[in-house]
Image: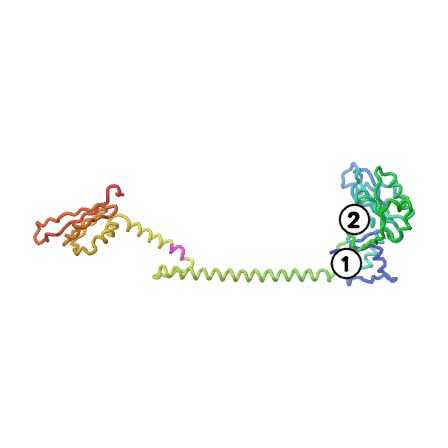
Amino acid sequence: MISVDHIHNLDRRITNEGSAFESVAGSNQAPMQLWVPSERVGLHLIDVPTAPERKWPELIPWLLEDRILQPVDDMHFVIAGRSDGGQLQILAVSHEDMRDWQRIADNAGVAAQSMVPDYLVLPWEQGRINVGWRDGLCLVRTGPEQGFAASADVAWTMIESLLDSAEISPRLSISIPDHALVPEHLREQADINNSVIDWEFADIPGTPNLLSGQHRPSVSQLPSAAWLPTAGLAALALVMLVSYLQIASSHLQGQVEGLERQLTSDYAKLFPSTKRATGDIRAATEARLNDRFAQQRALNTGSVAGLVALDSLMQSCECDLVSLLAEQDSIELTINNGAQLKTRALNIPGYQLAITQSPNTAAGLPADMIVLMINPRMGDRP
């Protein structure tokens, strides 16, 4: 965080020999935002030039030539913003003052990042004029960017003029160490307190900044006390990030290896006759499952399904199979001692069964030899 202070406080740090009490070692300087005395800064309003904005810095000095007591070449101009009426607000300060303030900052070991008129330290509220006190001078803020600094007698006169010219008289807040310094007629209508401005803890606005143009702030190297902790924290964060990534990678690698071992073990249990590498297990499993599905379909269709169904019919029949003739759909069985089959209720779902007596004209054929014909039902034919 960049510190804040008043340029006069820096000036008090300088010894008679010109060295700073708190200079920073080497070429490093501490960055700081500075309040500067408003009595050295003039605020002017001008109409917006018709020329392109990039040419305004060249035109503004000559537009203010009649209002500036010094030669315009000796002055530094900064555009502070626009007023409620749309006019440009121009801050004017001499180059000599700017150089003096920058010299004070350098001697104090400070790299000035901004310089702002100190009347802007006062709070701003619509419909209120705020007055502060600094080293015998009154600081007066009359608008968002408007204000001035002057000796007490001049400041009271200017405040009276502002109150008289306003259509609606603004409220008045005064922070001053001695109430007797306020004129009696102003004391009656003002809110007065003895608050002291704390320059180091006051919020400094980003604009207007007098350090612009030829007086722009130089890039200052941060002191080692500021950047070394930051660099150390950054290095520590990087080390922690790398360590976390390594731990996470090792953990994921262990999970992957565990899954591979489980996959190999499960495959060996299902198909113990073969061993496969981890990368081939998926393809090998799909091929084996396809073979099993094809075998299942074959067992449930055609003559094979009929043979499977006969297993329950032929149990405990005390008969002998003499011959079997299987075609695509039908099966013909010649059975010896098949008398018990004639007495059973033979039923195979999806098939028609027919038992006929085998012709015994041939020599040596038993009399109880039968022929069992199995055919698919008409509606079940493929």
Q: Is residue 186 left or right of residue 87?
A: right
Residue 284 lies in the magenta stretch:
yes
Residue drawn at (53%, 60%) of the image: 249
Residue type beneath disc 1:
Ala
Q: Is most of the magenta stretch helix, strand or loop? A: helix
Residue drawn at (78%, 62%) of the image: 24
**Residue that numbered label 2 is attached to:** 209
State which quadrant residue 275 falls in.
bottom left
Q: Position of residue 107 (x, y in %)?
A: 83, 59
Image quadrant holding the C terminus, namely top left
Disc nearer the start of the sequence (1/2): 1
Foreground pick, 4 / 139:
139
Secondary structure under the numbered disc 2 in the rendered image: loop
Secondary structure under the numbered disc 1 in the rendered image: strand
State which quadrant residue 161 falls in.
top right
Q: Position of residue 98 (x, y in %)?
A: 84, 51
Q: Which residues are magenta?
A: 281-285
Q: Is residue 230 left or right of residue 180?
A: left
State which quadrant residue 171 falls in.
top right
Residue drawn at (18%, 47%) of the image: 373
Residue 337 in sight from this viewpoint: yes
Residue 330 lies in the magenta stretch:
no
Rendered view: 89 above or below 282: above
**Residue that numbered label 1 is attached to:** 30
Residue type beneath disc 2:
Asn
Q: Position of residue 192 (x, y in %)?
A: 85, 49
